[in-house]
Image: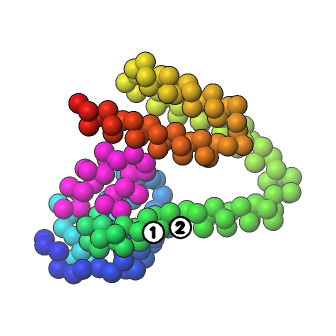
Amino acid sequence: MEQTKKPTPLSLFWAIAQINTVTLGGGYVIVPVMASTFEKRGWMSEGDFFDIFAKAQAFPGPLALSTAILSSQKLCGTKGAVAAFFGVILPPFIALILVSGVIGSIGSLPAVKRFLEGAGAVVPGIVAAMLWKTASKRKWTLAKAIETIVVTVALVLFPSLSLPILLAAIAALYGIEVLCKRSK
């Protein structure tokens, strides 16, 4: 099916925001719904969408975000990519604000306190399991091990600067990787 209609950035934003509002399960659940939506609206064929999805898997970051940005950029250029970014990011952001408001209102109730304490005890285990799974699948080199250790030590020593440290590390390490690939 060829593209029959050209969406506007606003229509892309609304379609993607609606998908991200009601779809739970991450990129591998959101992406097929997005493909179906784009095809039903005549914006893009399923084949074209999944070609973009295949390319999106090479990008760092959340799969649903990369796929939405790349497919929307193809449809509407930079404005479409920006619309897709906000369509993916805003629904969970708003949901977090609403949930935090509810927890702020009822968080002092004994049952809610016990639940939150229990959930808080589980989080380090979930994070450790995710780190173990990721680390065990990574192809380690001496350089990658040193990079990981340096960033980890910086995060431990300067916890109040966690976000700037992570952003700087991601940018620097991504830049180094790109430069190394170009020099080959």
Q: Is residue 153 left or right of residue 3?
A: right
Secondary structure of residue under mark 2: helix
**Magenta region: which residues?**
48-70
Q: Is residue 54 left or right of residue 112?
A: left
Q: Amino acid at mark 1?
A: Gly
Q: Please tell me which residue is depicted at 25% across the width and 50% down the height of the picture.
A: 54
- Quarter of the picture containing the N terminus is bottom left
Q: Please tell me which residue is depicted at 38% across the width and 51% down the height of the picture.
A: 63
Q: Where on the picture, by quarter, is residue 10?
A: bottom left
Secondary structure of residue under mark 1: helix
Identify the disc placed on residue 77: none
Q: Where on the picture, by quarter, is residue 161?
A: top right
Looking at the image, the residue that sits furthest to the left is 1
* Category of crowding for the residue at label 2, using alpha-carbon neighbours closer than 10 angstroms: few (below 14), some (14–19), many (at least 20): some
Q: Nearer the viewer, residue 18 or 118?
A: 18
Q: CA distance from mark 2 to mark 1?
A: 6 Å
Residue 103's place in the image compared with 138, above or below, is: below
Q: Nearer the viewer, residue 80 or 17?
A: 80
Position in image of residue 55 (x %, y %)? 26, 50
Q: Amino acid at mark 2?
A: Leu
Q: Where on the picture, by quarter, is residue 121?
A: top right
- Quarter of the picture containing the C terminus is top left
Residue 173's place in the image compared with 63, above or below, is: above
Name the residue beneath numbered marker 2.
90
Q: Nearer the viewer, residue 157 or 58?
A: 157
Q: Please tell me which residue is depicted at 46% across the width and 40% down the height of the picture.
A: 172
* Category of crowding for the residue at label 1, using alpha-carbon neighbours closer than 10 angstroms: few (below 14), some (14–19), many (at least 20): many
Using the rendered image of the protein, determine whether residue 33 is visible from the camera's viewpoint: no
CB within 8 Å, label 2 to label 1: yes
Q: Is residue 62 magenta?
A: yes
Using the rendered image of the protein, determine whether residue 152 is visible from the camera's viewpoint: yes
Name the residue beneath numbered marker 1.
87
